[in-house]
């Protein structure tokens, strides 16, 4: 439904698939659709399966983990256009159909090709299985990017991170779709950038990253400074990219090199070589007669040290040239210009070979040892079409590469598609397009093309130069419609060409090339003396990239253009062997500014990328085609008439299948050898049905297979069991006999030992007594008492033979329990025990209810909910400078009449208080220092008589209360009264006198023993009667 939903907002954001535009021939409408989407930060648009990307020149929040999940395992037409959608579609075909894939990313420099390749790798890493071995491979694939970008990318006037080399990466997958390895091919590194950069451009990133990111000690060892203006190879263009942190990026590169398998020694040597190139660039020469001479010997010495060769060897290589002629070696001095050429040639050669070594090292790290069937996904990220003010040999090769890629695109998407419709007899309206094969032939045709002419001029004896090359091209190519020069152009065109220029009419537009430097760059000549100096280096990397055998080769190596042409031919073969997916990148302006959409610049790219032709073919064509046998073999399970085997021609089977699925002739057409499905939605619906059917078939096959396997396993197991069983029974019977015989001997010895158990240890009872001791210790270990009180009473008894050991163990264990208990006491518990000990001294053997209170801890409030009610009392006590210690409910009896009243007894560290239980008003206050005694009975009652001196007349005599927790309350009071134990008087049942009216009168309390367990307090004949039991 994505395509249909996208139509709702087409006036604001355009359509997501250009196939939905009204007029496929209207270029302005197509560009306006791109502009609408660009303004809404929607940078992706489809032309069928081809993805168009407009570089936003700013980060967008569309690449996070949730975005990746959104595109996993869905049909790409069901979600918004995205590089993740295209990648997922290619990944699914690779995984489910075992077909090699390739993703071709094309566009001008600065259009976002490198970023697109990063997002492809990011998606593959996230979408594949999370297995440790797979994670390692994914890490290496991702971490290879920072290394390649540092050494192969640079800032240009059109792109801050322009790839100055071509990269093709093959990612290898196992049968489950998990990445297991990879391989990288690099093409035509722009090594001239090492020694020369245009205004506003930089050298390769690694030079700046090294100077800003390396620590001071390493910088000193490399004899470098942080300022880039001190180096001839770095001070020609712009120094810094706005917003780029070279120091931070250097750490990223170092970490990436470690993660992909570079050893520390190799990393150090790489940076030494990079530093050496900077020093070589600072080697200056002076005129010495007709020849050149080193003007900066100290710099040569530093460069030689970092390159691992002798200064003398390097000095000679810079100023002399040795030529081999018929077995003899002739050495001659170089002119000033030749010395400069030799210096720059060495820098370019060393950097180029170092880069090639880095790629080979990455390939070694990515190499897989998987031996099973594997599939490949290729990602091509190669330089875009370039048109500069001054275009040289590098731009010629780059634009030649883009011509080849455009030819491939034409072959695979335009020409081949229309040819296929014609051969298959499918109704089709022909679409015109420009075939750039004529330009490719102009450049690469054998013996006639420009590369052949350049090679011939390089090999020609005599004084060949760039102007002689131009003359020869004018002579041989003057009749070609796509070649122009000053000499052969008409008068109008001649005004725009100088005598050292020629012009090619590329598919992307006209490009004027300066012929200066073409022959030297094509020759790519490195003098023998320089190569010899490098082969004698003690640096391992330089020994590998400058092998000694190179000096012995007699055959002249291919020129740079021929090598590049051969590499491109190999690349085309690789790409033609895979199922392609296309990403066409567009830059909206030439100034790298976000939000700026230049209609003229975009229109030029739309034209040379062939997007309109592609749109017209897509509108008129079919989204999917397959050979009948392949299609039927995959989807035959969806029709009962074709499953499991169709007896008849494959085309008839496909026709039956499509009719069974309910599709009409408008949805598909049948060719001579293939079926053509018009809309991708139709294919996705068939594929979804197939996935459901596949699950059903797998479940059925699995059930049958598991049943047969289990039956077979059962029969084999039964046979083996019967075979083993007869030997097992014999073995078990023999073992049982031995066991019984041993057991009878043991029992006999046990019985004899039992009969002699009371005798001293002897041979007859030794084992029995040993068994008795063993069993006693086992029982003892399970029944050790964990209490301190009555420890000896709880200690298990022991047989006679273990009596002495039992006595010692009891003593040791008691000490251990006591020690552990004491060490584990916290302050609160310690205080409780102190109070319990005081209660023990006060009541042990004196109060019959004491034993029942031992196990219960004393509390500060009785009952517990009293805490919240007496807050005001506690504040009053605190205000008087005292501290509340105890609070409980009691029943107070009047001295006259013994009327009971509910009170709250409160104890502080200085006094005893009685408050009304209802309104909490204070009724009594007795200072602890005024208290002369406390009388209680030895029975089970809670009677308390507080003795008050007669002189305290305001107290009106002794205080009588009944306290449910009498032992706890008395202990608390005695403790608060400085543990004055003499205050307590415990009396037996009988009469207890108490003072009234300041001691003038005496009241009687009769305590009587009762058979009932309930305590009863009554008034009789003027006395207070307490009936209690114990």
Image (cartoon, helix red, strand yellow):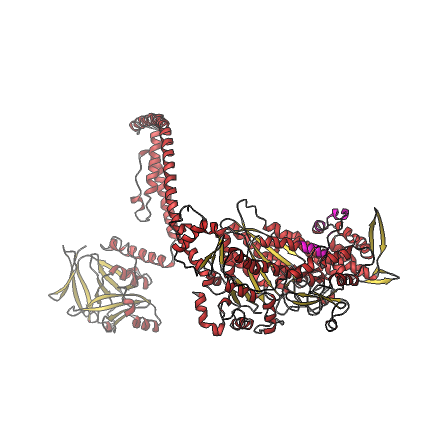
Please give the count of numbered marks on the rendered protein.
0
Q: Position of residue 239 (x, y in %)?
A: 68, 68
Q: In this view of the protein, can residue 1025 be seen by the observer?
A: no
Q: Position of residue 780 (x, y in %)?
A: 33, 40
Is residue 707 toward the left or the right of residue 223 in the image?
A: left
Instruction: Find the residue positioned furthest to the right.
Output: 289
| Residue 735, quarter of the rendered image | top left
Q: Position of residue 509 (x, y in %)?
A: 65, 68
Q: In this view of the protein, which residue sits in the foreground, 853 or 909?
A: 853
Residue 548 magenta-highlighted: yes
Q: In this view of the protein, which residue sits in the foreground, 33 or 491?
A: 491
Classify the position of the C terminus by image quarter: bottom left
Q: Is residue 418 above or below residue 951?
A: above
Residue 377 magenta-highlighted: no
Q: In this view of the protein, can residue 498 be seen by the observer?
A: yes
Classify the position of the N terminus by image quarter: bottom left
Q: Is residue 643 above or below residue 118?
A: above
| Residue 410, quarter of the rendered image | bottom right
Q: Position of residue 437 (x, y in %)?
A: 64, 60
Q: Which SS does the magenta portion mostly show?
A: helix
Q: In this view of the protein, which residue sits in the foreground, 176 or 135?
A: 176
Q: Is residue 24 above or below residue 137?
A: below
Q: Which residues are magenta?
A: 543-566
Is residue 685 toward the left or the right of residue 337 in the image?
A: left
């Amino acid at each position: 439904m994505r395509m249909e939903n996208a139509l709702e907002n087409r006036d604001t954001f355009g359509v997501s698939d250009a196939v939905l535009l009204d007029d496929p021939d209207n270029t302005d409408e197509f560009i306006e659709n791109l502009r609408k989407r660009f303004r809404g930060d929607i940078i992706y648009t489809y032309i069928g399966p081809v993805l168009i990307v407009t570089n936003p020149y700013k980060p967008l929040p569309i690449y996070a983990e949730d975005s990746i999940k959104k595109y996993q395992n869905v049909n790409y037409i069901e979600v918004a256009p995205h590089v993740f959608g295209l990648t997922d579609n290619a990944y699914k075909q690779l995984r489910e159909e075992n077909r090699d894939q390739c993703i071709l990313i094309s566009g001008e420099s600065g259009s976002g090709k490198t970023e697109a390749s990063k997002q492809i790798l990011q998606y593959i890493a996230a979408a594949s299985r999370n297995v440790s071995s797979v994670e390692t491979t994914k890490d290496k694939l991702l971490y290879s990017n920072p290394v390649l970008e540092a050494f192969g990318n640079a800032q240009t006037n059109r792109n801050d991170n322009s790839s100055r080399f071509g990269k093709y990466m093959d990612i290898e997958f196992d049968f489950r779709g998990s990445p297991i390895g990879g391989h990288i091919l690099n093409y035509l590194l722009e090594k001239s950038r090492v020694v020369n950069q245009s205004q506003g451009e930089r050298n390769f990133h690694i030079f700046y990253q090294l100077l800003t990111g390396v620590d001071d000690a390493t910088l000193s060892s490399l004899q470098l400074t942080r300022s880039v203006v001190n180096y001839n190879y770095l001070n020609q263009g712009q120094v810094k990219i706005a917003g780029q942190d070279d120091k931070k990026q250097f750490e990223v590169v170092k970490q990436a090199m470690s993660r992909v398998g570079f050893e520390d020694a190799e990393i150090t040597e790489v940076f030494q070589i990079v530093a050496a190139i900077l020093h070589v660039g600072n080697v200056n020469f002076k005129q010495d007669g007709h020849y050149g001479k080193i003007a900066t010997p100290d710099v040569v010495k530093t460069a030689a040290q970092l390159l691992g060769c002798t200064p003398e060897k390097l000095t000679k290589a810079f100023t002399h040239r040795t030529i081999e002629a018929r077995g003899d070696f002739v050495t001659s001095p170089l002119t000033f210009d030749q010395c400069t050429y030799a210096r720059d040639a060495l820098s370019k050669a060393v950097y180029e070979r170092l880069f090639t070594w880095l790629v080979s090292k990455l390939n070694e790290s990515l190499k897989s040892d998987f031996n099973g069937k594997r599939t490949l996904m290729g990602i091509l990220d190669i330089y875009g079409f370039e048109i500069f003010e001054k275009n040289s040999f590098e731009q010629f090769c780059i634009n030649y590469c883009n011509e080849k890629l455009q030819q491939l695109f034409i072959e695979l998407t335009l020409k081949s598609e229309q040819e296929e419709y014609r051969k298959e007899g499918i109704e089709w309206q022909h679409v015109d397009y420009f075939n750039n094969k004529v330009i490719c032939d102009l450049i690469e045709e054998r013996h006639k093309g420009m590369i052949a002419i350049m090679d011939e001029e390089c090999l020609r004896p005599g004084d060949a130069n760039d102007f002689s090359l131009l003359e020869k091209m004018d002579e041989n190519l003057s009749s070609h419609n796509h070649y122009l020069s000053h000499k052969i152009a008409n008068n109008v065109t001649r005004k725009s060409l100088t005598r050292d220029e020629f012009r090619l009419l590329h598919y992307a537009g006209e490009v004027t090339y300066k012929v200066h430097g073409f022959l030297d760059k094509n020759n790519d000549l490195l003098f023998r003396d320089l190569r010899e100096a490098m082969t004698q280096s003690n640096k391992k990397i330089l020994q590998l990239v400058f092998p000694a055998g190179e000096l012995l080769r007699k055959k002249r190596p291919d020129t740079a253009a021929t090598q590049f042409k051969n590499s491109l031919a190999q690349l085309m073969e690789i790409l033609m062997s895979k199922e392609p997916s296309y990403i066409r990148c567009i830059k909206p302006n030439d100034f790298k500014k976000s939000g700026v959409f230049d209609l003229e610049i975009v229109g030029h790219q739309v034209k040379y990328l062939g997007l309109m032709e592609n749109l017209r073919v897509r509108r008129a064509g079919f989204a999917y085609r397959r050979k009948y046998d392949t299609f039927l073999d995959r989807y035959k399970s969806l029709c009962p008439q074709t499953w499991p085997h169709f007896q008849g021609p494959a085309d008839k089977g496909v026709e039956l299948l499509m009719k069974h699925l309910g599709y009409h002739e408008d949805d598909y057409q049948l060719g001579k050898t293939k079926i053509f499905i018009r809309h991708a939605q139709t294919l996705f619906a068939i594929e979804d049905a197939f996935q459901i059917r596949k699950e059903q078939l797998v479940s059925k096959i699995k059930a049958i297979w598991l049943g047969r396997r289990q039956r077979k396993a059962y029969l084999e197991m039964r046979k083996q069991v019967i075979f083993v069983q007869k030997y097992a029974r014999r073995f078990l019977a023999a073992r049982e006999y031995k066991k019984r015989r041993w057991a009878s001997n043991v029992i006999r010895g046990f019985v004899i030992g039992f009969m002699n158990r009371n005798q001293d240890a002897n041979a007859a009872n030794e084992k029995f007594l040993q068994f008795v001791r063993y069993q006693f210790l086992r029982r003892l270990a399970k029944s050790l008492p964990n209490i301190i009180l009555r420890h000896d009473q709880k200690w298990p008894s022991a047989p006679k033979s273990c009596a002495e050991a039992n006595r010692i163990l009891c003593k040791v264990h008691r000490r251990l329990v006591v020690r552990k208990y004491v060490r584990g006491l916290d302050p609160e518990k310690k205080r409780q025990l102190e109070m319990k000990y005081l209660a023990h001294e006060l009541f042990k053997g004196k109060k019959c209810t004491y034993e029942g209170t031992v196990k219960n801890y004393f509390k500060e409030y009785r009952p517990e909910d009293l805490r919240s009610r007496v807050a005001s009392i506690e504040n009053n006590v605190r205000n008087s400078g005292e501290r509340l210690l105890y609070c409980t409910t009691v029943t107070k009896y009047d001295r006259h009449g013994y009327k009971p009243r509910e009170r709250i007894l409160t104890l502080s560290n200085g006094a005893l208080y009685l408050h009304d239980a209802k309104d909490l008003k204070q009724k009594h206050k007795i200072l602890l220092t005024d208290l002369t005694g406390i009388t209680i009975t030895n029975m089970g009652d809670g009677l308390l008589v507080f003795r008050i001196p007669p002189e305290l007349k305001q107290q009106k005599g002794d205080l009588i209360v009944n306290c449910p927790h009498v032992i706890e309350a008395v202990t608390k009071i005695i403790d608060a009264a400085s543990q004055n134990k003499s205050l307590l008087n415990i009396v037996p049942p009988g009469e207890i006198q108490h003072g009234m009216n300041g001691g003038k009168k005496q009241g009687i309390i009769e305590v009587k023993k009762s058979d009932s367990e309930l305590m009863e307090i009554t008034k009789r004949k003027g006395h207070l009667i307490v009936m209690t039991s114990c």
